[in-house]
């Protein structure tokens, strides 16, 4: 079976709205490596977009899924509940930053988590409006699209977005936007267009994911917290991409001096099995009436079992410390590459959530073409990379945190060769 043959079948069978980054089809995967249907080996620096932080097919997670599989696969928690659903909620309530009592709801996808966080905030406040940031990504449902601060490809052709959603600039020093600019825009919004007493929630990513791996400055986060406290607004931290050891903490919000009211999570939560959650202050989480939250597959037993194993692996294998160590090594290598690559204008990110941004050689404009050439050259050398950013000029590095040292070293060599080849192209 050939990749090209399957791609023809895919194009005939799958609608074109479902994009695909690589023209190869996975047959098996283990830790940080993927083998395609032709037997070619690839080093995975995408991890399913920060999903398999604990690596492909981690034995602890596979064992947990198999054990649950032999017991039962589905009862719907709202019909016949099960104890491990409660146990995972208890662990997450304890792990999420903040001293207030917390409660949890499980759903299936990150977009569902965001949707339910907004529902909870509206139920708690009795208000409608929501504020998000430019460059943000919060999902492909209609509320998720409305909150997302990027038109192409997420909003194109889909008509009117959900009402009462407002955007302000996200601080990016490289692009000339400071925290002061962002807070001034928020205050201007309150003066000109939106009564803060109508705002249910402000939602932000501690590190923007699709937006380009820009880190929320501490002054921004504390400023949001102050505004929320002044006006009774719910502060939502979207940790769907930042969660579960990726940033060197179980949750990225641990690096700030303030806490969010609600945290959304998904991706790395269950190591590849679909599971998402909203965790937050109990008094806010209890605002919805019974039956107002949930879903048929929300908190599926297989995902719950996998997530409990993921938390064990993070703790027992010290993945937060390892994320910091790997991220440091990656940044050091990128700095060495930068010394001979004028197109690199920034290297950033906490823990092992690292990105590199490319501009034109003169440094005056974003260069999505150069980022794309690096990704293509890397794929030729069997290294899978992802681009991101509003301009598409950022490469993000999301390898499993469990990646073997020798495979990591091999990948860094390939990366250096790929950047050099992109310069010559």
Image (cartoon, rainbow, N blue to C red):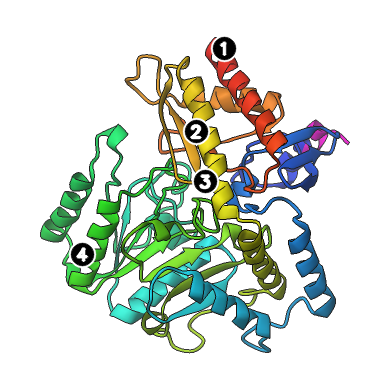
Q: Would you say residue 157 is visible in this rendering? A: yes
Q: Residue at x 50, y 22 (%)?
A: 336
Q: Is residue 75 above or below residue 136?
A: below
Q: Which mark is residue 227?
A: 4
Give the number of the mark in front: 2 or 1: 2
Q: Mark 4 near mark 2, Cβ–Cβ under 8 Å? A: no
Q: Name which of mark 4 and mark 2 comes first in the sequence.
A: 4
**Residue 274: x, y in percent?**
65, 63
Residue assigned mark 1: 425
Outermost residue, right direction?
1
Circle 2 packing at 10 Å, graded few (<14), some (14-19), many (20+), is some
Q: Is residue 247 above or below residue 370?
A: below
Element type where label 1 sits in the image: loop
Q: Mark 2 near mark 3, Cβ–Cβ under 8 Å? A: no
On the rendered image, what quadrant is the C terminus found in?
top right
Q: Name which of mark 2 and mark 3 comes first in the sequence.
A: 3
Q: Residue at x 32, y 20 (%)?
A: 364
Q: Nearer the viewer, residue 379 or 126?
A: 379
Q: Residue at x 28, y 36 (%)?
A: 173
Give the number of the mark in front: 3 or 4: 3
Disc 3/disc 4 C-alpha distance (Å) = 32 Å
Q: Which residues are magenta?
A: 1-6
Disc 4/disc 2 C-alpha distance (Å) = 35 Å
């Amino acid at each position: 079976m050939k990749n090209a043959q399957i791609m023809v079948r895919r194009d005939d069978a799958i609608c074109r709205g479902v994009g695909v980054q690589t023209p190869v089809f996975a047959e098996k995967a283990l830790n940080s490596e993927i083998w395609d249907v032709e037997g070619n080996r690839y080093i995975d620096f995408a991890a399913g977009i920060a999903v398999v932080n604990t690596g492909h097919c981690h034995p602890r997670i596979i064992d947990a899924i198999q054990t649950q599989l032999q017991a039962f696969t589905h009862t719907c928690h709202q019909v016949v509940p099960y104890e491990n659903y409660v146990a995972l909620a208890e662990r997450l309530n304890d792990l999420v930053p903040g001293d207030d009592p917390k409660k949890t709801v499980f759903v299936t996808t990150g977009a569902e988590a965001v949707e339910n966080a907004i529902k909870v905030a509206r139920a708690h406040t009795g208000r409608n409006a929501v504020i998000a940031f430019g460059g943000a990504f919060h999902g492909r449902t209609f509320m998720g699209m409305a909150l997302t601060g990027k038109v192409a490809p997420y909003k194109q052709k889909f008509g009117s977005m959900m009402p009462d959603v407002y955007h302000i600039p996200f601080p990016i020093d490289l692009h000339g936007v400071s925290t002061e600019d962002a807070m001034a825009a928020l205050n201007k919004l309150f003066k000109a267009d939106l009564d803060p007493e109508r705002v249910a929630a402000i939602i932000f990513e501690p590190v923007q994911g699709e937006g380009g791996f820009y880190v929320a400055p501490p002054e921004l986060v504390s400023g949001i917290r102050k505004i929320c406290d002044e006006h009774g607004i719910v502060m939502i931290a979207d940790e769907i991409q930042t969660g579960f050891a990726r940033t060197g903490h179980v949750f990225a919000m641990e690096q700030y001096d303030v806490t969010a009211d609600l945290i959304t999570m998904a991706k790395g939560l269950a190591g590849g099995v679909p599971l998402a959650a909203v965790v937050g202050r109990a008094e806010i989480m209890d605002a919805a009436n019974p039956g107002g939250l949930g879903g048929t597959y929300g908190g599926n037993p297989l995902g719950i079992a996998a997530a409990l194993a993921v938390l064990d692996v993070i703790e027992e294998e010290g993945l937060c410390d390892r994320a910091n160590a790997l991220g440091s090594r990656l940044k050091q290598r990128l700095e060495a590459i930068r010394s001979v690559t004028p197109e690199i204008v920034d290297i950033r990110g906490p823990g092992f959530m690292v990105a590199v941004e490319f501009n034109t050689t003169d440094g005056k404009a974003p260069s999505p073409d150069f980022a794309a050439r690096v990704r293509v050259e890397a794929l030729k050398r069997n290294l899978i990379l992802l681009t991101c950013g509003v301009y598409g000029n950022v490469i993000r590095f999301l390898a499993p945190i469990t990646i073997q040292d020798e495979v990591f070293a091999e990948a860094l060599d390939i990366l250096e060769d790929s950047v050099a080849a992109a310069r010559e192209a």
